[in-house]
């Protein structure tokens, strides 16, 4: 099984440990992982700002980088969803369609493709799981509280395999953190208030760490936590699943 | 709306956020309504089937609107109702005014109608010498405060009971400092009884109109539409043309969804059917387009017209709860308002589709399954293409595109966050930048993942 690892641009630049953990975790599970060196970005920052028409070159570059894999895996629900919904090509729509069908967010790749039922990881801490919206409501990694439907959560399923880890219950289990891409600066007041409220829910319920499938939500919440000089830390879910 | 002085959502939301206590209370109150809605939804085993069914009924309505409207008109006329057609807000207001002029009535009462808010009917009638009193309690409160409603179901949800007490003291003579809701409601009741008894014409909204029978249904919890209509000689019902349902039996689906989605109640206290005028009464219906046919012609946005105005998307929206309805500067606030408003005036409302994180909760609670967050994304594309973005933003996006489209430029620029710190919108390394106002920047690592990979795994 040949897997291409897609590392979102801001993870590459600011959070290399989340990418390293994703790589190592997949390797530990016996996957043949490749990281195409000419990758940059999925194009979402432009598209969500209303400039999807500027993403054609990013799309072609993505297709060049990620053709020829059995699967493409990314430690981001948001970027994965963007590729799944918006990757198209004027030159080669067949390749784009092929990629849209084999791109997976990391946790769903572990549960749905690798069918992981055991992890040799150890993380003896109280952890709050933030459900990143694009992963949850877009990729349906977890059931959504708005719906009258049976509960499930792929990231939670994996976290429960981690030795010593205690998941804390939140008052609002799937409310948005307020990052929202350019929303976080364009709508600074509301974005920050959402971030403060989300972080407070985790703190109130005793979390030592906040984890999520998306580093962007965590970057926003970390910004709020650090400004408050809080001792609560953020970690990408791959770093916890790979810990030990 | 003039009261907002041309300000856009980010500024209006920032003003709302200056009062943290109010924001927290607003957020908690609406979240409580959302939880109440959840319990109501979880108690219906077939809830998701019900939503699918309602969505299909409304899809059919939108695809066959012309014939359902004609059926409705013919039946309503047969029932003795006078039917009027208005192409826009101005024509709607003129029609209402001319009915009142013909009837020589200048004092009227009105139950809640978002359509008349959309058309700014109250202002128009006031200018033309007609005195309107809103009889929905929340609407009456915002009317006394000379403000527009901030929520389509809970018009004065932005006001605390002490502020309402102050308004009642000023306008209805309650004792200074009285803010007990029961005491205030009792005074409002007496005040409104007087209004019902002395005003000879009523305007009501319409929740649903039935093509099969020519009747219309008005849902209220306070019974104020009924009180108004039963005592008035002239009843004018104003409705958007998308409010039509093919048959009475379809009410069995939408009425089960409406109140549960709105407030978590099984049904509104009153779901009143008006089929024909009683002896001596004159009943009018004004069918209003006001941009609806234009929206119907937009393939990406037409199904926004399925909306039954329950407000569930507002209650669940984390942005709405923390920015308040007035920050949307439109009669209909929140996620649904943000996909309806650009159709009315793309320039004026170009900010609204961006007042969202695209979290998708709105689409999940919508009882008629409007893909609200997808439409927000699509409106963003339209607004930029139609030229309603700023030059600065376009320039920034072009720089971003230039860098992210080329691995070489990206690698050169990227060296452990250097370019990102300067150029990515959420990471502008400048004390004045909006990110850093209330958040710390991530510390750039010694090397990017790509640099680490080349050193450690490079082939």
Image (cartoon, rainbow, N blue to C red):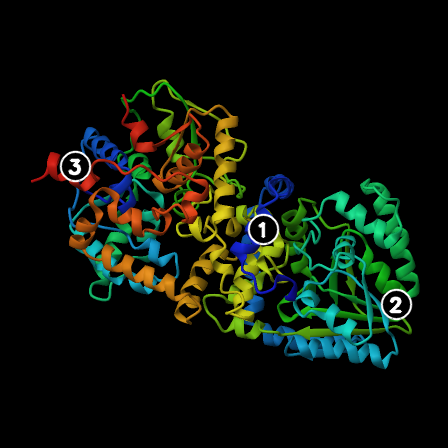
> Visible in this render: residue A150?
no
Q: CA distance from mark 3 to mark 1?
A: 45 Å
SS at badge 3: helix
CA gap, disc 3 and disc 2 = 79 Å
Cα separation between marks 2 and 1: 42 Å
Pick the front one: A32 or A18: A18
Q: Which badge, 3 or 1, comes first in the chain's sequence?
A: 1
Q: Write down the residue under mark 3.
A: B452
Where residue B380 sits in the image (x, y, percent)? 43, 62
The mark found on residue B15 in the picture is 1
Residue at which label 2 appears? B232
User: What is the quadrant of residue B325 in the picture?
Assistant: bottom right
Q: Chain of mark 3?
A: B
Does residue A11 appear left or right of residue B18 in this picture? left
B207 on left or right of A133: right
Question: Which residue appears at 46% of the width and 69% of the height?
Answer: B299
Mark 3 vs mark 2: which is more N-terminal? Answer: 2
Image location (x, y in percent) of residue B22? 64, 42
Residue extending farthest to the left is B459
Name above or below for residue B174 compared with residue A199.
below
């Amino acid at each position: 099984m040949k897997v291409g690892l897609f590392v979102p641009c801001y993870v590459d630049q600011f959070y290399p440990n989340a990418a390293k953990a994703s790589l190592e975790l997949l390797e530990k599970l016996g996957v043949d992982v490749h990281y195409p060196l000419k990758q940059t970005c999925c194009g979402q920052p432009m598209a969500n700002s209303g400039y999807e028409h500027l993403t054609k070159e990013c799309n072609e570059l993505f297709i060049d980088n990620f053709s020829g894999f059995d699967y493409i895996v990314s430690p981001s629900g948001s970027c994965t969803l963007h590729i799944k919904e918006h990757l198209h090509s004027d030159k080669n729509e067949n390749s784009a369609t092929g990629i849209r069908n084999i791109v997976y967010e990391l946790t769903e790749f572990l549960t749905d493709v690798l069918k992981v039922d055991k992890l040799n990881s150890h993380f003896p801490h109280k952890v709050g799981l933030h459900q990143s919206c694009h992963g949850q409501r877009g990729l349906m990694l977890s059931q959504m509280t708005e719906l009258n439907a049976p509960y499930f959560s792929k990231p939670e399923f994996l976290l429960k395999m981690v030795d010593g880890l205690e998941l804390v219950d939140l008052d609002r289990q799937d409310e948005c953190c307020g990052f929202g891409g350019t929303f976080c600066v364009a709508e600074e007041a509301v974005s920050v208030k959402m971030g403060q409220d989300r972080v407070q829910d985790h703190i109130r319920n005793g979390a030592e760490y906040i984890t999520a499938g998306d580093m962007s939500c965590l970057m926003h919440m970390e910004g709020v936590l650090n400004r408050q000089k809080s001792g609560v830390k953020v970690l990408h879910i791959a770093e916890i699943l790979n810990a030990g | 709306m003039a009261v907002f002085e041309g300000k856009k959502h980010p500024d209006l939301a920032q003003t709302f956020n200056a009062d943290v206590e109010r924001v927290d209370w607003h957020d908690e109150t609406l979240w409580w309504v959302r939880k109440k809605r959840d319990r109501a939804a979880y108690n219906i085993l077939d809830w998701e089937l019900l939503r699918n069914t309602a969505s299909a009924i409304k899809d059919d309505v939108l695809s066959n609107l012309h014939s359902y409207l004609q059926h409705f008109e013919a039946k309503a006329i047969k029932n003795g109702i006078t039917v009027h057609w208005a192409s826009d807000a101005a024509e709607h207001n003129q029609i209402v005014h001319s009915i009142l002029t013909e009837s020589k009535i200048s004092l009227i009462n009105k139950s809640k109608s978002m359509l008349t808010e959309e058309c700014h009917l109250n202002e128009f009638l006031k200018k033309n010498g007609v005195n309107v009193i809103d009889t929905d309690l929340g609407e009456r409160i915002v009317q006394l405060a000379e403000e527009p409603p901030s929520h389509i179901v809970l018009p004065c949800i932005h006001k605390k009971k002490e502020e309402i007490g102050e308004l009642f003291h000023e306008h209805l003579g309650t004792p200074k400092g009285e803010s007990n809701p029961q005491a205030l409601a009792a005074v409002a009741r007496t005040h409104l009884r007087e209004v019902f008894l002395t005003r000879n014409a009523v305007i009501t909204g319409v929740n649903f109109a039935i093509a099969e029978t020519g009747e219309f249904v008005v849902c209220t919890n306070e019974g104020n539409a009924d009180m108004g209509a039963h005592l008035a000689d002239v009843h004018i019902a104003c409705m958007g043309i998308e409010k039509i349902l093919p048959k009475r039996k379809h009410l069995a689906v939408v009425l089960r969804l409406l109140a549960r989605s709105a407030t978590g109640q099984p049904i509104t206290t009153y779901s009143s059917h008006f089929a024909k005028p009683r002896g001596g009464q004159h009943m009018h219906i004004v069918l209003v387009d006001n941009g609806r046919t234009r929206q119907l012609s937009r393939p990406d946005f037409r199904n926004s017209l399925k909306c039954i105005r329950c407000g569930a998307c507002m209650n669940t929206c984390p942005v709405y709860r923390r920015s308040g309805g007035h920050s949307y500067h439109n009669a209909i606030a929140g996620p649904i308002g943000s996909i309806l408003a650009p159709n009315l005036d793309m320039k004026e409302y170009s900010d609204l589709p961006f007042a969202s994180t695209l979290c998708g909760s709105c689409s999940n609670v919508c009882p008629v399954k409007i893909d609200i967050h997808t439409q927000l994304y699509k409106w963003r594309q339209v607004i930029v293409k139609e030229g309603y973005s700023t030059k600065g933003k376009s320039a920034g996006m072009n720089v971003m595109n230039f860098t992210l489209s080329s691995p070489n430029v990206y690698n050169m620029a990227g060296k452990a966050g250097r370019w990102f710190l300067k150029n990515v919108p959420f990471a502008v390394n400048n004390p004045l930048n909006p990110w850093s106002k209330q958040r710390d920047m991530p510390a750039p690592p010694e090397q990017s993942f790509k640099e680490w990979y080349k050193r450690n795994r490079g082939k």
